[in-house]
Image (tube, grey):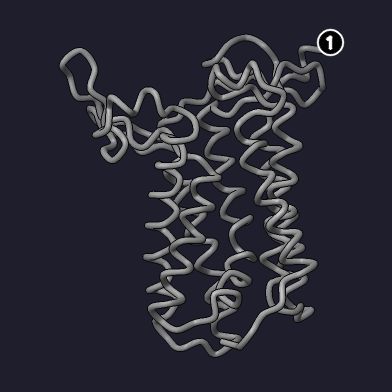
Amino acid sequence: MDKIMILSWDVSPDIFRVGGLALRYYSVAFMLAILAAYTVLNRIFRREQVPPGTLDRLLVYMVTGTLLGARLGHCLFYDAAYYKTHLWEIFLPVVFRNGQVEFTGYEGLASHGAAIGILLASWRFSVKYRLSLTWLLDRLAIVVPLAGSFIRIGNFFNAEIIGLPSTLPWSVTFTRVDAQPRHPAQLYEALCYVLIFCWQLYRYYQAPRPGQLFGSLLLLVFTARFCIEFVKENQVAFENDHLLNMGQLLSLPLVLLGIYFLKFYKVYGER
């Protein structure tokens, strides 16, 4: 193996730190994800002459749904045993260790939980503001993969969700983890999501029937996620004894839901 070609990644996750508070690359990536999604949706909403102020209200619902869903998803799907006895740490960005309170931010966020949170927030928004849920999900389906690509880049800076050992020339050694060259699985996902975003935007301008964009989002994103999991390290120990890990098991029903929307869904009524 030509070690000269292996990237050694030893970048600190903190951009700067003052005492116990820090600005992290992941936080910046999350904010850029929101900004990028907002910018694209703003152009789409203007094109479709959606009433002013709708997007700003939608933003509150989506950010709240994403954060709550992602946080609860991680705590329930991946580490329920720990959070069963540390309930406050589910909702507070701190951990309690040896009688001390340490600010950590929300280190555990699960994308499948975020997906559920977005679906619930979309449903609630559509009911309150009398919008077609299918119409709304189709528009969100354009920007969700774009936002997801920024999040995975943030994971790369955090040296988390790392890949399995690899001898490929584009392997990365996450020196804060170990000295083993690995698949940059976070970047694999980020690239897939950018490509899916481009496809979704292209399909939007082809005026597909209602439900198609949402269906293709679920099918493409979670098929990519299912496949990339094969080159990832398991996130929790209990996954080591199973053929499929938690990320793959949670992806399967969403892939099936995507197929349903693409092949069988018929919408009744319009926005």
Towards the viewer: 140 or 131: 131
What percent of the width, then of the height, locates residue 71?
Answer: 41, 42
Residue in the picture at 62% in, 25% down: 162
Q: Quadrant of residue 41?
A: bottom right
Towards the viewer: 24 or 56: 56
What percent of the width, then of the height, locates residue 10?
Answer: 54, 20
Q: Quadrant of residue 3?
A: top right
Tell me: 190 left or right of 130.
right
Residue in the picture at 67% in, 37% down: 187
Q: Quadrant of residue 27?
A: top left
What percent of the width, then of the height, locates residue 24?
Answer: 41, 37
Tell me: 17 left or right of 168.
left
Residue identified by numbered label 1: 1
- Helix, strand, or loop for circle 1? loop
Q: Quadrant of the N terminus?
A: top right
Tell me: 108 left or right of 86.
right
Residue type at the position of mark 1: Met
Residue in the picture at 67% in, 26% down: 232
In the depicted structure, whether residue 128 falls above or below residue 248: below
Query: Mark 1, residues whose alpha carbon is within 10 Å: few (<14), some, or many (≥20)?
Result: few
In the depicted structure, whether residue 143 falls above or below residue 102: below
Q: Quadrant of the C terminus?
A: bottom right
What percent of the width, then of the height, locates residue 79?
Answer: 44, 27
Residue in the picture at 66% in, 65% down: 214
Tell me: 43 left or right of 193.
left
